[in-house]
Image (spheres, rainbow, N blue to C red):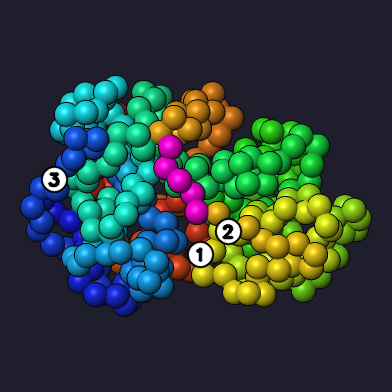
Amino acid sequence: MKAIAINDFGGPEQLQPVERPMPPITDEQVLVAVHVAAVNPIDWRIRQGQLKQFVPYEFPVILGREVSGTVAQVGAAVRGFAVGDAVFGFLQQRLMHWGGYAEYVPIEAAKLAHKPASLSFEQAAALPVAGHTAWQSLFEVAKLQPGEVVLITGAAGGVGSLAVQLACHAGATVIASASPANHDFVRSLGAALVVDYQAPDFAATIAARFPAGVDVILAAFAGVSLQGARPLVHPGTRIVLLSPVATEQDMQIGPVSSQILIARADGAQLEQIAQLAVQGRLRPQIAAVLPLEEAARAHAMSESHHTRGKILLRVAPDDPA
């Protein structure tokens, strides 16, 4: 099968086309014929070697942690999925080796969901990682309640754009930080106030409207945008940090300790998220769809932190859905 893999850690040039054998599956897995794979920041962090001490790996590493496609083979213990089913899911693997930048990928059935007919393969591929991350950050870790005020940084990105919509749907008041070019876009998702995270007084702008501060901060990135929010934090504020390489300074913001979320794959939860998309309450945002061969370009786009929504790689030649 064709794939894009790395044989060493480094820059985007490490992403090279390769021919690999068909991946084996266990009794609990299915083999998915990939139509679309998504690019996430964790992909290039893995490629750079930032996470090599945390997650076991075996070269050649095929990157990619979320896909949509069709079931090509079913493990002996799998129930609920059959060959030909349209599916999508989050590849949360103990060993980095078989990933989504390939024609076929093995994935545990418990981490898969059926793709609703009304969602394209592109829309479905944009949901698993960002959807799980946004959902689990807001509702499982921060325990966001109706009427609370939440600050979402990186609000135009894949996770941020879904988090804005989920928080609004839950009855929270959303403050979003994004670059000025994305303000109208983020506002269209339901944010009550949008600020420029690069502005030195962005916390003062928020405090003028919300003098009591914020109840929840969902920080897509550590560093300046999180540190700048320090004046908005009170003892009851819950901070969820998505950066896996946070500094000690990022872990303590005023009187509050940040909590790092490592999203988990959950097929049943993904089915719930998909239903919100079907109902029109959640719109996955797609920044670009590139051919698999342009994975290096996709990584460069993701590393810029200036894309609006998810970057996708088309693996199959067309989308039969």
Residue of label 1:
244
Residue 74 x, y percent position in the rendering = 18, 31
Q: Which quarter of the rendering shows the C terminus?
A: top left
Q: Which residue is mark 3?
A: 24
User: Looking at the picture, how far across and down is residue 278, in whole percent?
Assistant: 49, 25
Q: Earlier in the sequence, mark 3 or mark 1?
A: 3
Q: Which residue is mark 2?
A: 260
**Mark 1 is on which residue type?**
Pro
Q: Residue at x 41, y 53 (%)?
A: 311
Q: Nearer the viewer, residue 52 or 147?
A: 52
Whether residue 265 is visible: yes
Check residue 117 in the rendering and tell me which mark sits there, or answer none: none
Front-lying residue, 304 or 97: 97
Whether 276 is drawn above or below 198: the answer is: above
Q: Is residue 263 within the magenta segment?
A: yes
Q: Amino acid at mark 2?
A: Ile
- Overall secondary structure of the magenta stretch? loop
Residues under numbered marks 1 and 2 in contact, where contact means CB atoms less than 8 Å apart: yes
Cα separation, mark 2 vs mark 3, equals: 33 Å
Quadrant of res 223: bottom right
Number of other residues with Cα within 10 Å of mark 3, as a class: few under 14, some 14 to 19, many 20 or more: few
User: Which residues are the magenta region?
Assistant: 262-266
Please tell me which of labels 2 and 3 falls first in the chain. 3
